[in-house]
Amino acid sequence: MGPLYLFELASSQARHLELRQSTIATNVANANTPGFKARDVEPFNKVLDTMPVRLATTSSSHLQLSGAETDTRATAKKDSWEVVHSGNSVSLEQEMIKGNDVSRDYSMNSAVVRSFHRMLMSSVKT
């Protein structure tokens, strides 16, 4: 059995989500601070793009995909929805949406890890 990288990947994403949630909390805490600029963390898919994963070809009948067909880096930069007269660019609505995205991503991460763990344990028992 080869190395299992799913747990390492899930752990990396959990650390990324923790950092993003902390950044969102800082933005919300400074919502009334004059001149404060809202911040965000690079999307996790950009982190993954720096670590390319190649599909293994174990048979000559496998299809080969070009780099253009597997490129997932097309993400647009989102600006804040509003900038008030004090120069503050924090939009509480946008920060709450980001917080919900983090919560959803963390729930998905946890569900995948639980499922993989159950699958791994059932294969060890048999």
Image (cartoon, grey):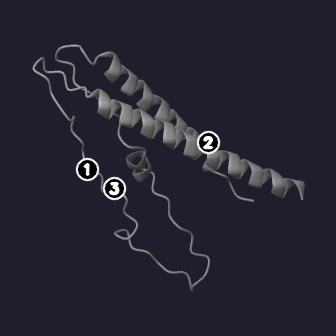
- The tag earlier along the polypeptide, 1 or 2, is 1
Read off the residue under disc 3: 73
* Disc on res. 110: 2
Label 1 neighbourhood size at 10 Å, few (<14), some (14-19), many (20+)?
Answer: few
Position in image of residue 117 (x %, y %): 73, 48
Residue depicted at 31% across the width and 31% down the height: 93
- Above/below status of 87 relative to 65: above
Q: Is residue 35 above or below residue 83?
A: above
Callout 1: SS: loop
Residue 47 relative to residue 6: left or right:
left
Residue extending furthest toward the right = 126
Q: Residue furthest front?
A: 93
The quarter in which the N terminus is drawn is: bottom right
Q: Quadrant of the C terminus?
A: bottom right
Q: Position of residue 105 (x, y in %)?
A: 50, 43
Neighbourhood count class around disc 3 (C-alpha, 10 Å): few under 14, some 14–19, many 20 upward: few
Residue 80 visible in image: yes
Secondary structure, mark 3, is loop
Q: Nearer the viewer, residue 15 or 97?
A: 97
* Vertical position of residue 89 compared to residue 29: above or below: below
